[in-house]
């Protein structure tokens, strides 16, 4: 039940602080026989990494993954897989000035109240640096899922008040998403976003974002009623990402204003007539695409000064001079994908335990 | 890790089907010495129950709680508390006609695909009847929390497209909320809602709703980074309720369009200057009010006919003639409260395990 | 992680006190489709029950199992199975006299110190009455195991200083075991045991016992290194039974004085040349019979007076006049079987989750 | 529920293979504020290490512990503590010859059948090298326990057929135990043991051993009925150590032949009159010393040839030429201590969660 472990059967335990010697994870319960090599991690870690464009934090981490255990002759053995990434660009001095302050919107105050002491360097454990290991662990999960026809992909669906123009959520151009630094589904809009982000960075302010993740190919039957429901696990997984403020499935909050005749996805022999459910009914997958939306708050670390108090309760002004993302939601796309993939492999193994297989029992409703 | 258990240290395992002989729960890990009697359950179960007004399902269950264990001479003993509620108004005949159909928007199809077989009577395990036991278990949790100054309350914040008029979320009139069948915070609007619901019921259609839950008095320090974060646990808890499609904390999805200077809650010696965070930073409580929003979809069981398929994949028309709520979100208010209370007691015990006490280590920031 | 739950994937949560209204359990994670009826529980519960012969406690419980959930039209549905047994012969007055004393060798003192309060009626939660539900839950587990060729059986291997005469552990006559009230493998010795027990009962004293459990048909590959090893789980399961003081696997404590050349079970193409390992190597089943030995202490409740203290620390004399077994180890045989069966189904499901099937990957070493 | 994790609230997850790049562990749930430095691990790791005397395997590992996370300015912060030990003396060539054979008494065959593939180098994950991390994690546990007056110590109680002469288990000379390479409580017997072990090594054979662990200072009230009983957790913990075949508490298997009047530990105002219970009643500590006995089998890796089969089922002769202990039980002493310490801290935190403190509620029975 350790709180730094995600998943019950594909259990990922992460460790490490933003500016400590290393971050890492241990994956327990991984099926044996999956081919895995250090270079398999490169692509997704690069998608998540900072310092790649001017629109993200300028911290540059090598993010080289060392496989310490659980892999023999290029294949998983069924024993725990430990992955290690050394921190190489940790500039603790950037943070010394604020070690005695509580940055507004950060976990400084809450860690200090919970544990009595805290590691102030770069946010310590509360830093989004931890999510590196989620993405790394999910690389293995995605491989296993891909072998069963399941593909998990995400894109940005909103930055601040900017929405994708002329976008149909049912026909995402995934190549377009991967071709720009914003994971934006409408390529023609990228110059607009570049200008928007440049202006934002100059202003010293930050902005929120909305991420959408779609998992295709999930068979009917995954999900564990009633407290391990697929949507409940997705909500927990996505809400555990730094800076998340909301999670929705399918129609999400829009369902509040819908009528039942509009929302319920009727069924014909040719398949479901809609997917307001987001691919989940009663906490179990329907076989349709699973769709999640995630709200990210604007970065709290700003060049613009703010009011706060110090350890003794005295008022002070806080200004963040470190390297930060003006919109943390952008880099959150691969992290959201990772969490959805980790939920899915875990649910697949749980389903297999109880029901004997990963697939549905009966013939499927198409589509 | 059983999926019908909620909580790690205050662990509630529920069982029972909508039209089986009984529903019940076992609460393990409850602190000893809490006074508890059968009549303590009456108030909250009545708030959740159907059949009380014309605006909810007309099923009338006695909902009498029998305490089977774990209480001696009126106090909890530290051993498992089993609670049992017999089903008395289960009319299976209402459901016979649809046993071979998959109701759109229901778990019929997914249970059938997952398990191969399903109990079709009233939705079986997937029925919201299960939530009776969540509310019952939370009665004990709320008692313990009240002893530490923590109060959890909820209200409806939207029905369909109707919003509360002139409502300030910071100063909820909780007496008003409890005085009307809609848990609506603006009493003057009740006649409007009555008319709205009457029209809806006549039309045979249904509508979604939005619930807001506020937990006051939570000390700083509750919550378990990084996968057992307080907000992640709340998201999981609330998303596990039947018909939920979205969960948000604090500013929630509104944070997407906010600027960092607007969202971050600055701090002065007199306290926080806002609560966009919803009382949680880095997954740990700040000492401010914890605020959650929950989206409920419109009921899928409608008198208006809909298209679906039967077990053999043939097209059929489905019409629900059973007793159903035109807006399930209304009765969800006490259920949402219950889940928040269950999360809070569990986090409090987890905090106490690691840190030795339920309270914060240092002097608090006021407010 | 609740401590009244046994098993991770086939999770059995028990509740109830010896003299409360009822005892029961909830089984979560049970595979769907297993045929089950109330009468299936009769045989094993009768084997465990008191009051059947003069050699066990004279308490007579009907032990009628009511299935509250999880079974539809005679088959498990995959949802939680709740079983309930009402207590009908609870004579609380037998215990009133000792409510203020700590019975030596009992949990009176420790419950009181742990929880502050305790239910003194018949030992409350610490009574062996709880094991009724272990046996009931294992009836379902045994059914599933039997479908895979796995049979779990136990016998008494020692009462006090009495050992079975001319007994070969490799060829147990299981019919003989079931034909006498002592689960004794050598029928000719039964008159001797009857006389031994009669004398013991007259003396007012009690005696320990040793139980042996054998599981045949387990395929190679079940067991979870390194902390969920099959032998570690068996040790935990068996040591959790009331009055257990020791557990051993295969050669057990006799291995201490063995040489490596004697202990290691060499292998030929015809199979293993011995089974000192007790069917487990590295925490994983070998395909040989799994063999466990369990030590039970003599009953602590005696008619012969003993010294103790009362709640205030004053010396008092304790004499037990209630109904007790002079040798609790006898009735422990079906309980030990039950725990082994519960471990095996749980391990089978865990194996299936990670490795995709319940069987071994490669051709087996015979026998 | 991952099977490479030990403990529920002080959760230790280990990883690593005998001849992989490194072994390590992650400790989650550790209380904050415990002072810890790399040199704190030296003493206990040296007690467990090979290559220190001629009586253990000649493999020499530096066993230098790197603290990767969870410690800031010399104190635990409450976040996960990752410990890493690089493997430096891994001679894989020693094992190449037997990669296609199943060593009798080893996990070669069972891992191969469970996972399909296995890492044959030095036993891979099934090697006792993994226990290094148990000892390392327990160093932190012991520090916390020592702060509450709890001391855990072990000694050898039997090697093969050799028993300690004139030894009184109630008055162990712990200094004597630490002064000889056998953790033997009777110093005068050491020359006899040296000769015994020299002869054994020359013969090429091996022998079993019995370890005894005593935990003093545990307050009444630790332990979680009914499946997380203190004795059940100890049994699981100790049985999970490589080569263990049996575990007993207090009188253990000797209780089988005892009478109730002999076994039950009567109580007077001056304290308990015996400790046949081994400090545990009803799964909860009594405040007396907790006493465990553990049986270790003789090492299966022998220079003396044995019969086995290869991957194809053909008969082959196996001779172990690697570096092995003639009596693995000797080095098991600090490992047994470690497991007892890990159980105790976990139970203490669980007790604190439910009951609010680590100590008993009422005044204690002395002694």
Image (cartoon, coloured by chain):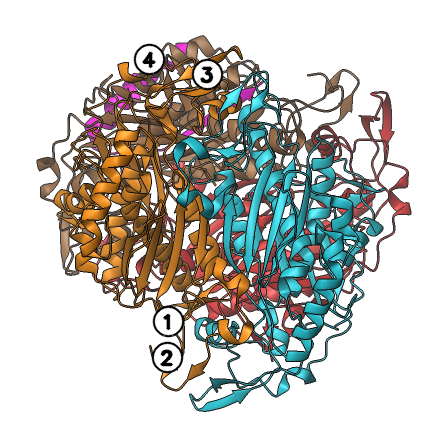
Chain colours: A brown, B red, C cyan, D orange
Residue D341 as seen in the image, left or right of residue B216: left
Badge 4: few (under 14), some or many (20 or more) residues near its Cα, within 10 Å?
Answer: few
Indicate the secondary structure of the residue bearing disc 1: loop
Q: Which residue is mark 1?
A: D287
Q: Position of residue B247 (x, y in %)?
A: 51, 42
Q: Nearer the viewer, mark 4 or mark 2?
A: 4
Callout 3 and callout 1 share a chain:
no
Q: Position of residue C155 (x, y in %)?
A: 67, 50
Callout 1 and callout 2 share a chain:
yes
Counting residues from the start of the chain, the first of labels 4 and 2 encountered is: 4
Range shown magenta:
A187-216
Residue B67 in view: no
Q: Position of residue C304 (x, y in %)?
A: 59, 83
Q: Which residue is mark 4?
A: D96
The disc numbered 4 marks a residue on which chain? Answer: D
Residue B54: give its label.
Answer: none
């Amino acid at each position: 039940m350790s709180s730094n472990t995600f998943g019950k059967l594909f259990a990922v335990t992460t460790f490490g602080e933003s500016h400590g010697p290393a971050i890492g994870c241990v994956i327990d319960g991984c099926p044996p026989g999956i081919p895995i090599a250090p270079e398999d991690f490169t692509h997704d870690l690069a998608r998540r990494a900072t310092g790649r464009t001017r629109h993200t934090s300028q911290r540059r981490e090598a993010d080289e993954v060392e496989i310490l255990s659980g892999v023999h002759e290029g294949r998983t053995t069924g024993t725990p897989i430990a992955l290690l990434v050394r921190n190489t660009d940790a500039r603790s001095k950037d943070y010394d000035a604020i070690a005695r302050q509580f940055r507004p919107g950060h976990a400084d105050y809450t860690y200090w109240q919970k544990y009595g002491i805290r590691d102030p360097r770069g946010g310590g454990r509360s830093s989004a640096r931890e999510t590196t290991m989620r993405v790394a662990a999910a690389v293995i999960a995605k491989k296993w899922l891909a072998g069963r026809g399941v593909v998990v992909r995400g894109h940005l669906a909103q930055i601040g008040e900017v929405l994708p123009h002329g976008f149909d959520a049912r026909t995402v151009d995934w190549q377009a998403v991967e071709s720009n630094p914003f994971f934006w589904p409408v390529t023609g809009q990228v110059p607009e976003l570049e200008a928007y982000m440049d202006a934002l960075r100059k202003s010293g302010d930050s902005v929120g974002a909305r991420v959408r993740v779609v998992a295709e190919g999930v068979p009917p039957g995954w999900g564990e009623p009633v407290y391990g429901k697929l949507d409940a696990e997705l909500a927990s997984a996505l809400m555990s990402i730094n800076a998340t403020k909301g999670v929705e499935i399918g129609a999400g909050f829009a369902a509040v204003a819908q009528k039942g005749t509009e929302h319920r996805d009727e069924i014909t022999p040719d398949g479901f007539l809609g997917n307001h459910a987001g691919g989940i009914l009663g906490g179990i997958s329907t076989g349709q695409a699973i769709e999640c939306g995630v709200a990210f708050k604007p970065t709290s670390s700003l060049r613009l000064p703010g009011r706060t108090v110090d350890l003794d309760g005295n008022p002070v002004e806080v200004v963040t001079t470190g390297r930060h993302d003006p919109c943390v939601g952008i880099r959150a796309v691969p992290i959201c994908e990772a969490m959805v993939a980790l939920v899915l492999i875990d649910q697949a193994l749980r389903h297999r335990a109880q029901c004997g297989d990963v697939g549905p029992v009966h013939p499927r409703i198409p589509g």
